[in-house]
Structure formats: structure tokens, C-alpha cells
Image: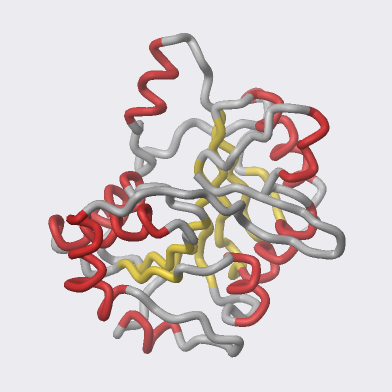
């Protein structure tokens, strides 16, 4: 899951976590890393060169263990997926899935997504953005650490092409309300859902139900999808 920390004058898309890398994940770094991992650079990136083709590019921020990422990439081979995650076990897990599923349309940046946005992705370079189940920071005093805040959304909106989309999903209703409020306040974005839906979108068919989400649904927990388009 993507996390957020907002120290003074700084935006970051994560908090540091410890985790153990399995032998299979470590092997995936060796086998698939050279092709599918891309280094961070403080200069605009040529996405066509990165993927070896010209295709619509979707940015994913915080893919966790990569389950949904691999599923969506397999469903949409015609699109490129640029995926940011800082946690090594998650990166290794996605590299392992890439090898197992023979995926060619994913590239991974193991770096803070905010710096990637600031330095590598120029305005109008993206066709979509996925942010699924960011850390909700349940306590009110920690809400300021949530990833979805106006400064980040302004950066994302500027990097979307007209007609591009931003898709967020959360299973925490107070965070869903905040996401809806923040995205609604961004002048470069418009909601794809109408008022009869309360501003929330039906779950897009491409987003899979994860084990975590299925477990929550069985316990009566809700899931909210918010999908906005660049005007």
C-alpha cells in the first residue's frame, strides 16, 4: 500500500517499513531486475525508450506486493505501466509475478513517486494514474500524513494528458470522503461519477478484488472508487 509523510515543506509518497525479501523475490531481482527495473534520474524520461514502444502510459503509486498491478497489466497489454514502490519485498514480488506471467509492459522505479513526478515526468506525459488502498492513517492527528493531499493531486493532474484519468480506491470511508473532496477541488480534474452515485464511481472492471479486499467485504467493509478525468 502507498503511504504518505508530510514533514515541513516536503511531500513524500511513503514511510519506511521493514520487511523480509524471500529467496524467490531475491532471484527475481537478479533475473528480471536488469530489464524491468529503471533507475531514478533527476531528468525527464523518454517513456518510449523506457518501454521500447509508444503506448499509453499509466503511473501506479505504491503497488504493495504487485497483485493488482500484474493483473491489470495482463488485462491491458496495449498499455504501459510505470510503477513506483520503495519497499524491496514488494518490488521483488512484482518482479517475480512479471516472470511467472511473462509480462512485458511493466517497468518499476524503486523510488519516491513525488520525486519521480517532479523530475522525470513532464506535463502531459501520462494517460492514467492508479493509487489503490493508500495507508488511511486512521487517527485524526495523523490525517495530514495521508498521501492524497492537494499538492500531490495538482502535480498528478498537470502530468495527465487531456482525457487521462486518476483512479483512487480505499476501504476507509473517511479517507474516501477526503479523496473526493481533494480531487473535486482540483480545477484540472472532473468527476466521472454523477451526483446520483454520491460522487463515487462503480468499481472499474480492470481493478481486481484482492484477498485483503475480499476479506473486508465479507466482514461488511465498504470499498470506494474515485475516478476523475483531466479536462
Number of residue marks: 0
Q: Is residue 104 above or below residue 211?
A: below
Quadrant assignment for the C terminus? bottom right
Q: Position of residue 131 (x, y in %)?
A: 54, 49
Residue 46 placement, left or right of 182: left
Q: Residue at x 43, y 39 (%)?
A: 204
Q: Position of residue 110 (x, y in %)?
A: 46, 68
Q: Residue at x 53, y 19 (%)?
A: 222
Residue 206 placement, left or right of 148: left
Residue 43 placement, left or right of 107: right
Q: Position of residue 223 (x, y in %)?
A: 52, 25
> Does residue 143 show up?
yes
Q: Based on the displayed image, in which of its 4 quarters is residue 192 positioned?
A: top right
Q: Is residue 124 above or below residue 200?
A: below
121 vs 34, nearest the viewer = 34
Q: Residue at x 45, y 33 (%)?
A: 203
Q: Is residue 187 above or below residue 123?
A: above
Q: Residue at x 27, y 48 (%)?
A: 71
196 vs 101, nearest the viewer = 101
Q: Based on the displayed image, in which of its 4 quarters is residue 114 positioned?
A: bottom right
Report the colour scheme: secondary structure
Q: Position of residue 91 (x, y in %)?
A: 36, 59
111 vs 133, nearest the viewer = 111
> Does residue 231 show up?
no
Amino acid at each position: 500500500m502507498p503511504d504518505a509523510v508530510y514533514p515541513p515543506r516536503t511531500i513524500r509518497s511513503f514511510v519506511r517499513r521493514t520487511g523480509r525479501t524471500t529467496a524467490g523475490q531475491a532471484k527475481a531481482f537478479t533475473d528480471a531486475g536488469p530489464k524491468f527495473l529503471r533507475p531514478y534520474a533527476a531528468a525527464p524520461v523518454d517513456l518510449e525508450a523506457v518501454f521500447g514502444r509508444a503506448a499509453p502510459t499509466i503511473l501506479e503509486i505504491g503497488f504493495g506486493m504487485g497483485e493488482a498491478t500484474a493483473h491489470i497489466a495482463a488485462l491491458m497489454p496495449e498499455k504501459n505501466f510505470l510503477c513506483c514502490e520503495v519497499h524491496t519485498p514488494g518490488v521483488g514480488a512484482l518482479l517475480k509475478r512479471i516472470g511467472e506471467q511473462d509480462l512485458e509492459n511493466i517497468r518499476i522505479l524503486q523510488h519516491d513517486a513525488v520525486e519521480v513526478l517532479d523530475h522525470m515526468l513532464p506535463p502531459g506525459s501520462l494517460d492514467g494514474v492508479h493509487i489503490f488502498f493508500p495507508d488511511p492513517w486512521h487517527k485524526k492527528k495523523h490525517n495530514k500524513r495521508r498521501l492524497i493531499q492537494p499538492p500531490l493531486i495538482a502535480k498528478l493532474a498537470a502530468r495527465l494528458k487531456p482525457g487521462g484519468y486518476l483512479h483512487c480506491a480505499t476501504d476507509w470511508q473517511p479517507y474516501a470522503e477526503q479523496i473526493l473532496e481533494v480531487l473535486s477541488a482540483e480545477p484540472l480534474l472532473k468527476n466521472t461519477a454523477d451526483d446520483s452515485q454520491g460522487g463515487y464511481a462503480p468499481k472499474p472492471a480492470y481493478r481486481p478484488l484482492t484477498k485483503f479486499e475480499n476479506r473486508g467485504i465479507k466482514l461488511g467493509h465498504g470499498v470506494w472508487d474515485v475516478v476523475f478525468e483531466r479536462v
